[in-house]
Amino acid sequence: MNHYDYIVVGSGIAGLYVALLAIKRGSVLILTKGSIDDCNTKYAQGGIAVAMGKDDSPELHYKDTIAAGDGLCDTEAVRILTEEAAECIADLITLGVPFDTLDGEITVAREAAHSVSRIIHAGGDATGERIEVTLSRQVRSTPIKVLEYCLVSDILLEDGRVKGVRALDWRTGSAEEYGCQFLILATGGDGRLFRYTTNSDVVTGDGIALAFEVGAEVSDMEFFQFHPTVFRLPGVAPFLISEAVRGEGGILRNVEGYRFMPDYTPEAELAPRDIVTRSIVAEMKKTHSDRVFLDVTHLPARLITTRFPHIYRFCRDHGLDATKGLIPVAPAAHYLMGGVRVNSWGETSIPGLFAAGETACTGVHGANRLASNSLLESVVFGKRVVQRTESLDKAGLASSFAVAGEAEQFHFLPDREMLPDVPPLNLPNLQALMSEKVGIIRSGEGLNEAASILATWRPSPDKGRGREGVLFSRPSPDKGQGWEGLPFPTPTDRASYELDKLVLCARLMTEAALLREESRGAHFRTDFPEPRPEWQRHMIFSRGRC
Ligand SMILES: Cc1cc2nc3c(=O)[nH]c(=O)nc-3n(C[C@H](O)[C@H](O)[C@H](O)COP(=O)(O)OP(=O)(O)OC[C@H]3O[C@@H](n4cnc5c(N)ncnc54)[C@H](O)[C@@H]3O)c2cc1C
């Protein structure tokens, strides 16, 4: 077994940044499922939040983040995020990320729910792409070993500690084990759970499912953010129209041309994402339409073409001049606030196992992420992961992961009755179920129905082993076998592996949403439409130590 000091799974901003810091301390292997730049990071448009403007401060950024999180942010984590932000942005600049400047100063833009302008960006609305290209180029110039098209299928433990991973080159079908001292999951969220999504097709919740399967704690899975404004035309793949467009003055109109946001909230188009999203859903229902419109025709054409060149080009490629006509938009799945529960050093409840980026739940987003805080979270807490491994090296491998406090509730994934008659499990059926029953608007009845179907598709990991053979018997790579005795994953089997991980994430999301009998942040239930003080706590799922 080849051994590395660090194995990093994933090559978005979190994985690449961690790897670049870790290589200064030891050997590093990056395993990534697609090509190095297959990830969500490259799609990020708006930018990164950091208190840089003259009228801004980490304290103000802290307050805005806490307000958006709707009572569930971890205050210590938000302090760290906002106070360590500038140092990490300086690192990115040193690494060569070309943030946009004006007269030699980095420019800051406004986004919804930020009280001042504080979003730095690159290439106008190509921030994520510029970051991904810069960091992957840097990685290529170091001794970091990168294995592309390698899907990590299992985490290996020894005496309760991480020992390494099993990975498959899914193009050739060859499986290999790699050993490490520190394993960092940077596999992104689970946005492919839903039919309309802004997420890349590699974002299938793998890291969360892998960590849960070996006994790590998973938290806040019920909080999933839908982006309010995603380009919506039949036959056109969802394409995000950045929050920053509303930040610059874009307004929302229904299909009758009426500006509706002021009817829902005094903050109008600049309200937090969950409020804008639900207002749009209500307006679409009222007007019997599958879309509303974003109007930027009153803004200077030059602002649109220079500040949002990607968006402008995308619209033009679909026959629409955004400076003259209205942009059709609707909400789509976007960002997972929950994930693998980590402390402020990125440690999970399994010694040697870390998580960074969207896979991790650091607690900074609470029930609702403030726009442009996720790229920032990836670098701030990614840096802390590497800092922590330094002290662990000196002090031995003891984890400082704390047991849950009073404000947290533990759950095991419950057993449910198998339903005799469920639709066959495939990605479209899973996405339809999640979009209809566990999407923007939820209810106890719909969640219950979804939970039973999901449990029939994928019984609890420790239960119904006999039944698991139906679809998801654990693969045994030693025997060169995959699911249901198939030869080990080929490209088609990559899809069935991903489906397995998605269903587990769907179960965690649905059971958490069902337990949370209130509405808070991105989680909205028609049967409990208000926040309830007794629910000002986190929910943690674990299957116990393996
Ligand atoms: C359209 C869009 C716009 C956005 N705009 C912004 C913005 O302006 N500002 C902001 O802060 N945030 C934004 N976000 C959110 C932000 O981009 C993401 O949260 C962030 O990029 C996540 O980075 P990451 O490194 O954690 O994961 P990702 O960038 O998603 O990378 C995940 C990596 O893990 C790999 N992987 C997954 N499973 C496996 C496996 N089993 N084995 C091996 N590799 C695996 C993938 O191949 C990929 O390389 C946006 C998101 C989207 C989708």
Image (tube, grey):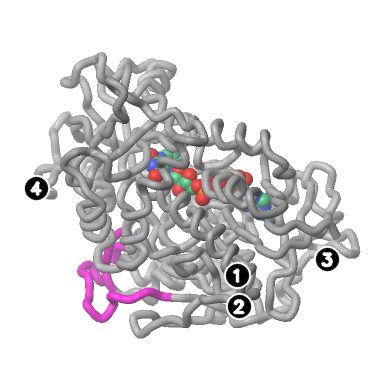
Count residues near mark 3 (Cα–Cα under 10 Å), then give few for <14, some for 14-19, many for 20+.
few
Give the label on residue 392, or none: 1
Highlighted range, magenta = 518-539
Up the image or down, 529 lies above or below 368; here it is below
Query: Mark 3 or mark 1, which is nearer to you?
Result: 1
> What residue is rendered at 59% in x and 64% in y?
389
| Nearer-the-camera pick, 67 or 481 | 67
Residue 376 appears in the figure: yes
* CB-based contact (under 8 Å), mark 3 and mark 4: no
Query: Which of the two residues, 422 or 367, is positioned nearer the viewer here?
Result: 367
Question: Distance from label 4 to label 1 (Cα)?
Answer: 50 Å
Q: Secondary structure at mark 1?
A: helix
Kind of residue at badge 4:
Pro
Q: How far apart in space, not on screen, are marks 4 and 2 (Cα)?
A: 50 Å
Amino acid type at mark 3: Ser
User: In the rendered structure, which disc, 3 or 4, sits on the residue that comes first in sequence?
Assistant: 4
Which residue, given by chain and number where applicable, does mark 4 sit on?
A: 266
Q: Which mark is residue 476?
A: 3
* Element carrying mark 3: loop
- Residue 398, disc: 2
Instruction: Give the number of the mark in front: 3 or 2.
Output: 2
Q: Mark 3 and mark 1 in contact? Answer it, CB < 8 Å.
A: no
The residue drawn where x is 57% and y is 54% is: 186
Marks 3 and 2 sit apart, C-alpha to C-alpha, by 31 Å
> Looking at the image, which is closer to me, 303 or 522?
303
Whole-angstrom CA distance, mark 3 to mark 4, is 57 Å
Q: Secondary structure at mark 4?
A: loop
Magenta includes 522? Answer: yes
